[in-house]
Amino acid sequence: MNTFVFQSPTKVCFGEYLSATAFEVAKDMGAERPLIITDKFLVASGILEPLLNGVRDGGVEPIIFSDVPPDSDVESVNRAAQFGLEQACDAIIAVGGGSVMDTAKAANICLSLGGDLLDYQGLNNIEDPLRPLVAIPTTAGTGSEVSFVAMIKDSAEHRKLVFGSRHLAPNVAILDPVLLISLPPKLTAATGLDALTHGLEALVATVTNSAVSDALAIESARLIFEYLPRATSNGDDMEARSATLVASTMAGIAFSNSGVGIIHALAHATGARFNTHHGITNAVYLPHGMRFNLEYSNAIYGRAARALGFSSSMDDNEASEALVKAVERLLKEVGLPTELKQLGVPEMNEEELQEWVNLVVEDPAIIFNPREASVEDIIGIYKRAY
Amino acid sequence: MPFFSSTEEVQKIMEALWYEIREHQEIALPLLQSKLIVQFHYREPEGRLTVDCSDGQNMLIIWGEYDKKPIVEMFMKADVAHQFWLGNVNVPVYLISGRIVAKGPVNRALALLPVVKPAFKIYPNIFEDTLNRPLVSA
C-alpha cells in the first residue's frame, strides 16, 4: 500500500432546515459579528430567511455581502474582505455555490491576516489559522464546503489563481437539502456531474489516493448515479436532493486528499478561456478523460464498475469500459451536452490552441493525473470532445 | 541525519547543478521562456537560491540575498531538494502533505516539472564530483 495522508478538518452537519442554526454554530466558535457572504439571487429568492432569522434571534442584524459574481475574481474577494473589515466582522458564513464558497475562503485570508490577497497565492503557505468559517452549499457539486482550496479568477490574465492550505477548509459545513429545492434542472445536473468528476478523478489519482478516499469516492459515485436523475427531473424530491448533497461533500473530501486530474485541468482552461460552466465542461470532458486514463486506471475503474453494479466481468478493461458507458448514459439521462461546441466553444486556430494548451499544462490538477499528457494528447482529447 | 552537513555543501551542490542546467539547452530554454524568478528556500541546513529567468535570455543563479522579488518561492528541507533531484520525490504527495510549500502562481512552476526531469540524470555525478564523496554514503 502507498504512503498516504488523509485529513478532513471540517465538521459536517446534515439536516433539513439546519441552515437556521448557522449563527449558533458560528457563535460556538466565538464569533459575534459574522459576515454572511452569498449572491444576489439567493438573497432575492428568500431561501436565506431562516438563516437570517437565526442571526436576528441571536440579537445581531445580519451583515451581508452579496456582490459575488458566478465566477468570482480577485476584485470581488477584495471587496468582500474590505466590507468585512469595515464592519468589524469576526467570522464568515458562506451560503451559495462554488463561487461564493471560494470567495469566502479567499476573503477570510485577507480578513484574518490582512495584506494583499495575491501574497497568499500558492500551496501550504498560510501558516496561521483563519477566522471561523461556516460553509452552507446551495448546490451539490463543488465540494468546496470541505476542501482546502480556493480557485479565484484573475480577470486580466484569464487565469485561475490557486490558494491551497488546510487553514482554508471551513470549520463547519452545514448540509441543508432544503436550500437546493429551487435549483433548476440544468444546474442540478451540471453540479452533480462536477461531483461525479471529483470522485472519479480522485479514485485514479494513483500516487495520492488511499483506501479511505477511494471508499468516499465510490460511495459518492453510487449516490450520484442513483439519485441525480431523480433530483434533476423532480427538484422537490428531498431524498434525491439529500443524497446528491451528501455525495458531493463526500467527493469533496475525497478529492481534497487525492487531487483531481486531467478532466479538471481541461475544464479549468476551457472555462477560463471561454467562460463555460465548470460542471457542464467537466461533464463533456469526463468520458474522454476517463478513456484517456484507462490504460493506467483500468484496475481501479474496473473495481468501481463492479462495486457500482455496472459490470460483473473480472476483466478490468471490459468493466472499466462499462463504467465509462454508464457515465455517457447518465449524461444523456440528465440532459447535459456532450460536445464542447454545444457550450459555445469556438473552433481555435493553431495559435489559440497553443495558448489554451498552455493553460491546461499549467493547471495544478494535471500533476495528479495517473497518465502524463503530452501537448498532442491534450489536443486529441479536446478534438474528441469538440 | 541530514544529507548535507553545512549550508556551504548545499550551496556548492545547488549552484553546480544549476550552472550545469544552464548549459543544457533542452532544459534551459523552456525555463528562460517562462521568464520566472524562482527562489528556493532550504532549511536543515539553511540556504536560499534564486534562479532568475526574467529577461528571457540569461539565467541568473544567485545564492543568498537577491534584490529582485521572486515570482514563485518554494520552501523545503535541503534533504527534500536532494531527493527531488535524485528523482525520488513524488511532488503531488509532498505538496498535499505540506513537505513542500509553494508561494506565488505555483501552477506556472509546476508546469515546468517535466522540463527539469532530464536534470535527474545529471545530479548524481554533480553530487559526487562536487562533494567528492559517493552518493550511496551520503
Image: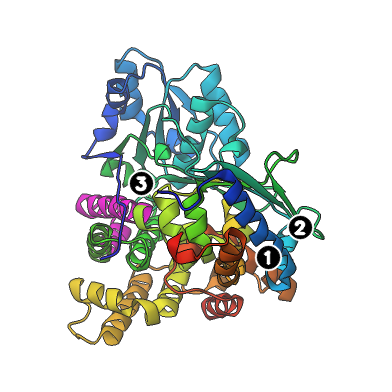
Provide the secondary structure element on which disc 1 rests. Answer: helix
Tell me where residue B29 appears, x and y as whole percent. Answer: 74, 67
Which numbered marker is on residue A182?
3
Pointer 2 indicates a residue of which chain? B
Tell me where residue A63 appears, x and y as whole percent. Answer: 45, 21
Name the residue rendered at 39%, 68% in the picture.
Answer: A335
Name the residue rendered at 34%, 77% in the picture.
Answer: A324
Disc on the earlier residue, 2 or 1: 1
Report if residue A379 lies within the magenta region.
no
Viewer-nearest residue: A175 or A182: A175
Q: What residue type is labelled 1?
A: Ile
Q: Name the residue under label 2.
A: B59
Report if residue A255 lies within the magenta region.
yes
Q: Name the residue under label 1.
A: B21
Pointer 1 indicates a residue of which chain? B
The answer to whether the residues at label 3 and label 2 have Cβ atoms under 8 Å apart is no
The answer to whether the residues at label 2 and label 1 have Cβ atoms under 8 Å apart is yes
Q: What residue type is labelled 2?
A: Met
Name the residue rendered at 41%, 79% in the picture.
Answer: A291
Q: Marks 1 and 3, Cα distance to the nearest angstrom?
A: 57 Å
Tell me where residue A153 appears, x and y as whole percent. Answer: 59, 47
Provide the secondary structure element on which disc 2 rests. Answer: loop
Residues in magenta?
A228-256
Q: What residue type is labelled 3?
A: Ser
- Check the image and name the residue furthest to the top: A59
